[in-house]
Image (spheres, coloured by chain):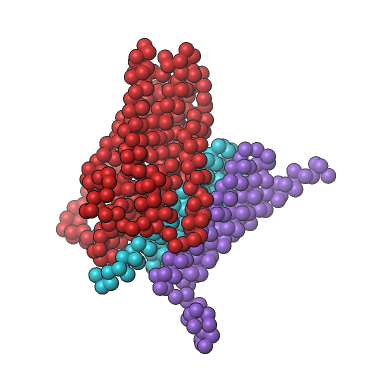
Chain colours: A cyan, B red, C purple
Amino acid sequence: MIFAVVAIAILVTMVLAVIRALAGPSIYDRVLAVNMFGTKTTLLLAVVAFLYGRADFLDLALAYALINLVGVLAVLEFFESRVELDRESPGD
Amino acid sequence: MTIVFALFLLSLLVITALAIVQTRNLFVAVMLLSIFSLLMAANFFVLDAADVALTEAAVGAGVTTVIFLSALTLISGTEKKAPQAGRGVALIVVTITTLLIIYATFDKPRLGDPEAPVHQHVAPFYIENTYELMGFPNVVTAVLASFRGYDTLGEVFVVFAAAIGVLFILDARTGTGPAYGMPEARGLKHHLIPKAVGGLLVPFVLLFGLYVQFHGEYGPGGGFQAGAIVATAIILYAILEGEKAALRAVPRSVLMALVVGGALLYGLVGVVCMLMGGDFLDYSVLLPDPVVGRQVGIIIIEAGVGMAVCGSLLSIFHAFASRRPSRIDHESV
Amino acid sequence: MTEVFPLVIDFLSRSLMLIGALSVLIGGIGVLRMPDIYSRIHAASLTDTMGTIALFSGLMLEAGFALATFKLFAIMVFLLLTGPTATYALANAVLESGSVPAAAKLSDGDDFKGETK
């Protein structure tokens, strides 16, 4: 019962994060929304693993917690390389 | 409870898909694709398909997003405006097809119906006989690696062909010719915190990848997931330390050896089974005890699958990431 | 005393999970309502950490002493390591791109670097 309530709370937060991803005026808003969505997915996976009583599904949450960082860092390196490029060739 | 999950996740899926199609800014599309992939992984998970959810999370959130972003550095960031002519006809065709498909779903069996045709013929055989024939509980791995071993062999060859195709198109050669001058070691070199934390994480991600590879018979896991996770670890290293350092750590020749070796290993196991008297890919003849023979056969071919997937994903990543980013306008974002 | 112990653990784990769910929800609302990117980053990251710690502690108490507890602990440690790193990298990227926090414009007589004129 308690798991269902927590799962619904996390789902609502995921909806809010998607709204920010769709509406965010700047790109950084969207990156923030994606990162937040990723953490919420990890939490949701852990709670649903308990809800379904299958404790070996926690491997997915573990995988996801590790992989989430790679996506965000890749995005930020993309920006940084773009800023460097603009600095190297101004007004190009 | 499944209905509540389905309601949230599937409607989010539709909204995200509409937003991806509608936006002309490719960077926004990549971010939304990452969310789409996570939603699909959550969907699979809620439907109790853990292996598929793990694969989707490992590939979609990590590798695919990074490859799309590397591709974005090579092109402009905005899509061309679609031609206006013919849109009315397209809308009518899509609407009619959608209505027909929705009408067709009224005839399908409900989710989990035990009388459904898909649960009648081979599925009960697999579920009932996996433990006594193979000795481990994960039915998905048993079906993938042993009962349907031919299909997985085909999949490994498809992954191999995809890697070769990308390398042909992007013309990535070994060695550093002047036309493909790798950019000076970029990467988040002067950011201490991501470097420190990321450096701490890389060995753990590798260890987790190996755990998923070898634990695939007892829990969600297997070769595909493990290959994607190990590739993610090395991509993390490339992001932190720069492309050159990553190519020094895992050179292109090693990647090619992994891809070719993985596919070969799988085929070789099949041939060895034939030489020892059984059919192609019938692992029970590998050892005197057929159950242990099947387990050994499955471990070896899963290793082959993992090697092939890891090598392919990394080759494709390096093919994109080691090109000099283009200097056409990036002001679109 | 020993027969009320499981009841206490139950109550504790449920309240921790509810606190976690509540903070996650507050974070979601904050990301939508805050005026500019910096305050949104602040809302998302603080509530993420709080929600992670509370929720996972509740789940660990619920699981008792099993393999699942160690896995949950590992997930929690990784989330606590990677969350603030992502926040730092994102905020750094926003700062490098030149955007000024909205709050810096509100106070008069203060330079953006924080030195008062």
Residue that appears at 47% across and 66% down: C91
Counting from the top left corner in percent of width and height, residue B330 is at 28, 65
Q: Is residue B161 above or below residue B19?
A: above
Total marks placed:
0
Q: Residue furthest left?
A: B85
Q: Is residue B37 above or below residue B75?
A: above
Counting from the top left corner in percent of width and height, residue B94 is at 25, 49
> Is residue B25 visible in the rendered structure shown here?
yes
Where is the N terminus of chain C found, in terms of image quarters?
top right
Q: Residue furthest right?
A: C1
In this rendering, would B319 be left or right of B190?
left
Which of the 4 image quarters holds residue C47?
bottom right
Counting from the top left corner in percent of width and height, residue A2 is at 62, 48
> Is residue B279 visible in the rendered structure shown here?
no
Residue that appears at 54% across and 85% down: C116
Counting from the top left corner in percent of width and height, residue B327 is at 25, 63
Q: Nearer the viewer, residue B86 or A46?
A: A46
Q: Nearer the viewer, residue C37 or B185?
A: B185
Which of the 4 image quarters holds residue A34?
bottom left
Residue that appears at 22% across and 53% down: B179
Residue that appears at 58% across and 58% down: C49
Q: Is residue A62 above or below residue B291?
A: below
Which of the 4 image quarters holds residue A25?
bottom left
Q: Nearer the viewer, residue B227 or B104?
A: B227
Q: Nearer the viewer, residue A12 or B180?
A: B180
